[in-house]
Amino acid sequence: MRAPAAAGPHAGLPVAPVQLYQVSMHYGAGETQVQALAGVSVTFPAGSWTAVMGPSGSGKSTLLHCAAGLDRVSAGRVLLAGQDITHATDAELTRLRRRTVGFVFQNFNLIGSLSAEQNVALPLRLAGARPSRRDVQTALADVGLADRGRHRPRELSGGQQQRVAIARAMVMRPSVLFADEPTGALDTGSARTVLRLLRRMVDAAGQTVVMVTHDPVAAASADAVVFLSDGRIADRLLRPSAAQVAERLTRLEG
Amino acid sequence: MLRISASTVRDRWPLFAGALLTVTLGVALVQSSVLVLVSTGDPTIPPGASGRLAEQIREGYVGAATLLGMATPLAMFLAVFIVGSTFAFSVEQRREELALLRMLGGSRPQLIRLLLGEAFLLGLAGSALGILLGMPATWLQARLLIGIGLLPGDFSARWSHGMLLLSPAVGIGVAVFGVLSASYRAARVHPLDALRSAPRATRVMTLGRWLWGVSSLVLTVMLVVAGHGADLLGALLVAMAIPVFGSIALSALSPLVVPLVGRLLGMVLRTSALGELAQANLRDAVRRSASTAAPVIVLVGLLVGLTGALNSLARAAGVDLERSTAADLVVTSTGAVAARIPQIPGVALASPQSQVEMSVTAQHRVDHRSYRQTHHSGITAVDAAAYRRTHRLTLRSGSLEALHGRTVAIGPRLAAEGVRDGAVTARIGPHKLKLRIVARLPEVLENGSDNFLVPRDLVPTAMLADAPTETLVQIAPGTSPQAVADRIRAAGIGEVRTLGQWADARVEAQQRGTMGIMAVLMGMSGLYAAIAVINAVVIAAAERRTEFAVARATGLSRSQVVRMAVIESAAVTLIGLLLGTLVAAAALASFYPGPAGVHILSVPWTLLGLLIMASLAVTAVASALTALTATRPSPTALIAARG
């Protein structure tokens, strides 16, 4: 893949945090077998933000799941933070989820019974750390929600919930942040706030972000866009405009 | 983890309410049983009570302890079972949340700890409530045991501080033990399930379910085979074990069995569109169906199986009693008036049997252990010649012809107690005499049989005259028993019954205690099962809001949706009833045809009927109400909320 311009302090890191080699993935067996990925090789470089796009059923979510170690690949190899996770045990994958990767989802997936602060502290506590209040509050302040720590998710707007989810993902300072349609359930204003937040994390802290989206505007905020079609990489764009993305997407769907 | 457990319990209490109630009731029952048990360990004999009365009081205490000892473990089994199935189901409902914890870096052991933590808190809360509820429960239980005549009227159970340790141990133990298998299932939840709005069809028949189900099934089949040739005691033991293992087996395997039986039911249901939809749901939501059917299986299997076994045992005792007694009428009176019976026209033979106030001290030897024991009750004065002609018994040894003067015969009740040959020491009023053992009677099934037979000429006339006496009467050939009975009544001698009536009454008197405890157990299990069924229906309804909305959007009216839900849960309940009856039938199989081909099987049809009606009513009402609640919002709102 043509490496996206990886500006910032992390430029020149030797190991890309996510590398996929000839990854294939199929569900089911026999007549009903579905090929979700067919020999995909892709590298997501450190300190860059890559959007993965494609028509429905193109395999973009599967790609994200395989790259994050949530799904096992049928063939090929997956390297996460330099570690081969193709045959990793559940305990190894659990460790990776704690230290190396963070997740943000379309539906926020906060735990309804916990306050914003408790939700943010949860990954730390699951990892056996005793989170300091200050760490948690800093993480919330970073997403502009310093004053909402005591609120339960149902007392927050969608955009606020998504920002809590980002704070929760970032509190462990993961090598890679995986985002699955992070703006999919938000209004345009909230979506813009979330995208700006991600941009700042990439530029200021050199965060690596891999984002699946079907929204050309969201994709245009990324450094690079990878297009998938029928489980294969169909195209790539560097720093595209929303219009360029939309045009490529229409062509793929057509 | 405990903090997450706490907030989950606080936030989703409806999910836990049923389990909490179950633990509370279980703790209360165990506490009250143990308190009553401890208090029965040291019987208070009123001063001045005769030896016979004291022995009867002691026997009542032992009887009460035995019944409590039987009922308590069964109640514990039910509590663990219900808590277990509630949690298993709630894990299914919380799949997304558990998957999210995995996604955020939660390990499998952490998820297990989370659920165990929830169970711990639940057990703690249930124990606190149970200790409080246990106090009135103890009083109630003591009243019940007094009511059925096992304990004297002035009995009261004492509080023991040990309960403050025991009750929480029971409560937490039941909750944690119940949640164990559910927690392992939770640990297998895949992180990706957090992202799937409709979770991938999970395998309902897990390896654990297979292992549990098949091993319990094999054990049940082995028990049924073993029970087939067993004697009555063996049959009873088998009948007590089968409901437990059979219920576990069929409940564990219910995801396989429910759709199978559902297909049979489907032939009836398919005739209407609603029925067809209900049957399709039944087949599709295997897990939900299994959760509703399981408590019904246990309830019916346990109650019908146990009650049937106890009733059959009682009938066997009655049959045995009738068969071994050669008499037409039985007259109950005092010894004095009984002496007039032979003069009544039409009486061919009268064999008086008087319960006398005396004591007999015998030497016992059982398993190389020798001891002396003094007996005060079950000592009967008989006329040896008449006794021989009214009892069809094959003596173990000796001869009743020699039962005259200072002699004694060892009664059926002590037949297996190893009374040593030679002599026993008797005490009649102030006199102490040595009695030579001349005969040993065989064992009988009846519990309240005699310890010793002594000749009437041994007992002072005044004592015989006061003694409560049963006289077995044979009628002269060609005379109507009814006419003779009327004549005895007219002579004012006492109560006259036919042999059959007398045998039934004797057996019933002995069964009264058992039935009282069974009634408590039935009430408890019924309540448990109702909680579990309602729980399953209510929890499921929340998950089905969208499904109901889709059904309405497809053109079903609200009342049609409710009817569909009711048909569905009624069908699941019917399946549970069917499987439970199967378990009960297996438990009772060893009583059929009965030893020596005598028909002793007694099926509690009334109980079965009541259970069928009550289960159907409870599930129908619960599902109708929850379906009504779930369909209150407009369907479009619910469908849209899904996206």
Image: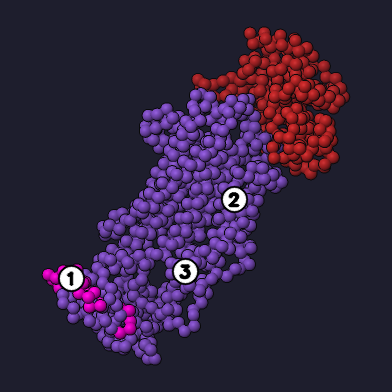
Chain colours: A red, B purple
Residues indicated by labels 2 and 3 sit on the same polypeptide chain: yes
Instruction: State the image quarter where residue A195 is shown.
Output: top right
Amino acid type indicated by mark 2: Leu
Assess disc 1: are there few (<14), some (14-19) or many (≥20) residues with their C-alpha within 10 Å of its C-alpha. few
What's the amino acid at mark 3? Ile
Q: Are marks 2 and 1 in contact (CB under 8 Å)?
A: no
Query: Looking at the image, is mark 2 or mark 3 earlier in the sequence?
Result: 2
Cα–Cα gap, marks 2 and 3: 30 Å
Task: Specify which label sits upstream in the sequence, 3 or 1.
Answer: 3
- Mark 2 or 1, nearer chain start: 2
In the displayed structure image, the side of residue A6 where residue B583 appears, left or right: left
Determine which residue is flagged by label 2. B20
Q: Is residue B181 above or below residue A236?
A: below
Image vertical order of residue B100 relative to residue B503, above or below: above
Q: Which amino acid, mark 1?
A: Ala
Q: Chain of mark 3?
A: B
Q: Secondary structure at mark 2?
A: helix
Q: Residues within 10 Å of mark 3 (few under 14, many from 20)?
A: some
Q: Return the mark for residue B146.
A: 3
Please tell me which residue lies in front, B594 or B309: B309
Vertical comparison of B187 with B149: above or below: above
Percent x, y for residue A180?
70, 25
The answer to whether one can see residue B203 in this image is: yes
Report helix, strand or loop for mark 3. Answer: helix
- Asked if the stretch drawn in magenta spans residue B468, the answer is yes
**Position of the C terminus of chain B by quadrant:** top right
Stretch in magenta: B464-492
